[in-house]
Image: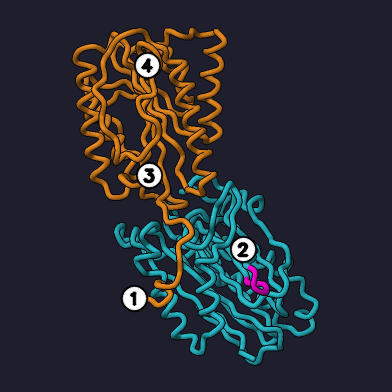
Chain colours: A cyan, B orange
């Protein structure tokens, strides 16, 4: 049986390069000794002055919170993944408030979205604010665990730094029998999700190759380089010049040995 | 090349679209220098937007005129296929019907985008007139319906509605028609060319914007007097 692993990458979008902006996406992930995994992906708002810092603060705080709840064997066994996912968003919000207060700035300056997935024993749950998405492979079936929020327009999004952020948080149902999960920012949306007659579905043409690749990784470092090359490719940037982040978790049902974390 | 780049397909290989509709007064009073300046400005606008690599692929343009009747000169289509018409001025000012038609077209276009899974920006409705409506009066049913529709649409973020008056437009009527948060502006003289340069630049900014990005529109001082 393969050891479970997580790998991912983020790349700066051509529009940010043109406008001399940093990459405002961030991600963080960790496996625990109990075999649970946490992935957090965040997209800083273009209009927020320090959103590159905000996205990193949010993603890091979310994963740290998830690991705390899922590292203790006793607590982890009984953990409600949906509840843990929700708590990670609350932790991220508190971290942003603290950072803003410390820096003497408005929290709005750190505006960002946030997607957090927690998974163990073949089950996963996600909590999500803003756009981007989470897709899982359950058996041979693609499942949209969490999709973009209800924003009609291409350039409007609800961030975690909004005063009404709690109204826009979504927590998914628990998804069982998963072997892979992918978490991505909106820079990948047009490639990854089909929108037909108002409903959103994961696109097999994108996730088929991604998950086949993911399940056959032997070297995480090389895998991350391949994902980075994909995100920077002409095909991915032809119709979307925003920053892009894609993180993939490959699971198994045995207890995992050791910890793995990354950003 | 990335190995995965060769293998993956893209679900939605389309740019997000920016639906923009021009609602243009071609009543008899526009005859002469005004209509000539407007016609020339439309040519410049087309050239400017089509030379912008993002806007040319993202702006969908429609044109409705009102004078001797309300005419849909152009249904929504890519600005790259826009051939500026030579507008002729004659007739009255059926502005109410023209606004209704334009807003219907906007809603239909958005529905088409949703059905096809196409991302889009908030639509722009750009009304230019040198007069006042002759098919509705303050207090009549059509007036309430049209003014209410503009107000609710702007408040509900269904579109952005801009009103530009050309002398001797009835500014009071235009203030009532325009959304409260976006009062009408009066064109300086015949500065149609600068008006459409501003519009082209604004659409370029919108076309490049990404989620969460606030697009600040440039000042209209070069071509308009902002009404109070």
Which residue is labeled 2 in the image? Answer: A94
- Using the image, determine if residue B168 lies above or below residue B157: above
Count every numbered label the image shows and give the total: 4
Residue at x 25% of width, y 36% of height? B46
Residue marked by disc 4? B66
For the residues labelled 2 and 4, the Cα–Cα distance comes to 55 Å
**Nearest-to-viewer mark from 3 and 1:** 1
Q: Residue B206 carries which label?
A: 3
The quarter of the rendered structure image containing the N terminus of chain B is bottom left
Q: Could you give the CA–CA distance between mark 3 and mark 2, rounded to whole angstroms?
A: 33 Å
The magenta span reads A137-141
Cα gap from disc 3 to disc 1, whole angstroms: 32 Å
Quarter of the image where one finds residue B10: bottom left
Instruction: Report the residue marked by disc 1.
Output: B1
Which residue is drawn at the image coordinates 59% and 47% (left, top)?
A: A198
The answer to whether residue B72 is above or below residue A29 is above
Q: Which of marks 3 and 2 is in front?
A: 3
**Callout 2 secondary element:** helix
Dot 3 or dot 1: first in sequence order is 1
């Amino acid at each position: 049986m393969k050891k479970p692993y997580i790998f991912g990458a983020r790349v700066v979008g051509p529009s940010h390069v043109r406008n001399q902006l940093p990459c405002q996406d961030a991600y963080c992930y960790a496996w625990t000794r109990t075999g649970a995994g946490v992935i957090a992906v965040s997209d800083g708002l273009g209009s927020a002055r320090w959103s590159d810092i905000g996205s990193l603060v949010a993603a890091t705080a979310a994963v740290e919170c998830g690991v705390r709840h899922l590292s203790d064997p006793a607590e982890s066994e009984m953990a409600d993944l949906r509840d843990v996912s929700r708590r990670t968003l609350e932790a991220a919000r508190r971290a942003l408030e603290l950072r803003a207060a410390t820096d003497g700035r408005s929290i709005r300056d750190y505006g960002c979205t946030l997607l957090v997935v927690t998974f163990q024993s073949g089950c996963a749950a996600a909590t999500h604010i803003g756009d981007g998405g989470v897709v899982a492979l359950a058996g041979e079936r693609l499942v949209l665990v969490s999709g973009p929020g209800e924003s009609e327009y291409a350039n409007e999004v609800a961030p975690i730094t909004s005063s009404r952020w709690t109204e826009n948080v979504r927590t998914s149902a628990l998804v069982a029998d998963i072997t892979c999960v992918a978490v991505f920012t909106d820079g990948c949306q047009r490639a990854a999700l089909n929108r037909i007659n108002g409903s959103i579905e994961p696109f097999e043409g994108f996730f088929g190759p991604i998950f086949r690749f993911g399940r056959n990784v032997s070297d995480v470092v090389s895998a991350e380089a391949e994902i980075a090359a994909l995100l920077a490719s002409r095909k991915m940037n032809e119709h979307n010049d925003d920053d892009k982040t894609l993180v993939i978790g490959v699971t198994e049902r045995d207890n995992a040995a050791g910890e793995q974390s990354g950003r | 090349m990335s190995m995965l780049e060769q293998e993956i397909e893209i679900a939605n290989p389309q740019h997000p679209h920016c639906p923009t509709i021009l609602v243009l007064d071609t009543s008899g009073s526009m005859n002469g220098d005004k209509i000539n300046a407007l016609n020339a400005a439309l040519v410049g606008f087309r050239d400017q937007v089509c030379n912008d690599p993002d806007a040319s692929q993202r702006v969908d343009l429609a044109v409705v005129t009102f004078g001797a009747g309300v005419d849909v000169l152009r249904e929504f289509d890519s600005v790259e296929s826009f051939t500026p018409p030579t507008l002729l001025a004659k007739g009255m000012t059926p502005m109410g019907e023209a606004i209704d038609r334009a807003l219907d077209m906007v809603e239909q276009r958005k529905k088409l985008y949703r059905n096809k899974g196409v991302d889009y920006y908030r639509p722009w409705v750009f009304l230019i007139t040198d007069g006042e409506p002759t098919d509705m009066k303050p207090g009549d049913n059509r007036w309430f319906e049209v003014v209410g529709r503009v107000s609710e649409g702007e408040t509900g973020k269904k579109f952005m509605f801009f009103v530009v008056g050309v002398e001797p437009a009835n500014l009071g009527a235009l203030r009532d028609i325009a959304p409260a948060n976006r009062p009408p502006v009066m064109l300086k003289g015949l500065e149609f060319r600068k008006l459409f340069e501003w519009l082209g630049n604004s659409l370029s900014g919108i076309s490049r914007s990404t989620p969460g990005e606030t697009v600040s529109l440039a000042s209209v001082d070069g071509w308009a007097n902002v009404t109070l």
